[in-house]
Image: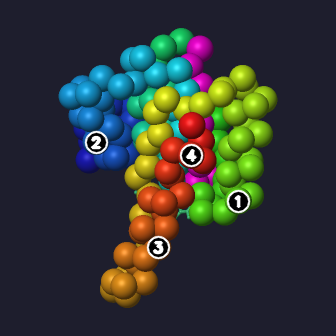
């Protein structure tokens, strides 16, 4: 995976978001970006590099994210929703105009349980929470 290191991006996931943005061009006009389930932080890196100067980018994950604004929280909890809201308020962000979500549970073969968790991750990224 030498090309990843040569690019400066920290993982292969970064290239998925680069490709999406090349097609849809949603980052160059974004003022506030919320990246849910963002560790280790490849998408945050891409977002920070492609939003306008002064735009706000924050990543949230169960595990710490390197660099940028980040919260170490479980996105399915009201504690996390409140923490994001506080961060919005303290940075003058009324709403996120881009919400990214690359979350997945640890998969190991308990398909029904894992599908339920995956759905819960999606429900907890729905716009009313953050927009
Ligand atoms: C595929 S990785 C995300 C990769 C990321 N987009 C990047 O560019 O580096 C999936 C992430 O979902 C996170 N995750 C799973 N359940 C979560 C939850 N309930 N709350 C927050 N993060 C969660 C995991 O910790 C993991 O870091």
Tell me the residue at 42%/17% (across/down).
29
Of mark 1 and mark 3, the one earlier in the sequence is: 1
Tell me the residue at 49%/50% (across/down).
126
Question: In this figure, which residue is indicated by the disc labeled 4?
Answer: 128
Label 1: which secondary element: helix
72 and 89: which one is in front?
Answer: 89
Question: In this figure, which residue is indicated by the disc labeled 1?
Answer: 78
Q: Are marks 4 and 3 in contact (CB under 8 Å)?
A: no
Of mark 2 and mark 1, the one earlier in the sequence is: 2
Question: In this figure, which residue is indicated by the disc labeled 3?
Answer: 117
Q: Does the residue labelled 3 lie within 8 Å of ligand 1?
A: yes
Q: Residues within 10 Å of mark 1 (few under 14, many from 20)?
A: few
- In the image, taking residue 88 as reference, residue 108 lies left or right, namely left
Q: How crowded is mark 2: few (under 14 residues within 10 Å), some or many (20 or more)?
A: few
Question: In this figure, which residue is indicated by the disc labeled 2?
Answer: 16
Label 2: which secondary element: helix
Say which mark, if any, is on residue 43. none
Relative vertical location of residue 29 with respect to residue 78 in this rendering, above or below? above
């Amino acid at each position: 995976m030498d090309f990843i290191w040569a690019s400066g991006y920290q993982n292969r996931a970064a290239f998925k978001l680069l490709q999406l943005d090349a097609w849809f061009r949603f980052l160059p006009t974004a003022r506030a970006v919320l990246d849910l389930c963002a560790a280790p932080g490849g998408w945050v890196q891409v977002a920070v590099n492609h939003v306008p100067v002064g735009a706000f980018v924050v990543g949230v994950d169960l595990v710490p994210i390197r660099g940028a604004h980040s919260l170490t929280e479980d996105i399915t909890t009201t504690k996390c929703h409140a923490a994001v809201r506080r961060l919005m308020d303290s940075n003058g962000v009324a709403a996120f105009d881009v919400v990214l979500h690359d979350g997945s549970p640890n998969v190991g073969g308990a398909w029904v349980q894992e599908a339920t968790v995956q759905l819960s991750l999606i429900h907890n990224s729905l716009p009313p929470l953050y927009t």
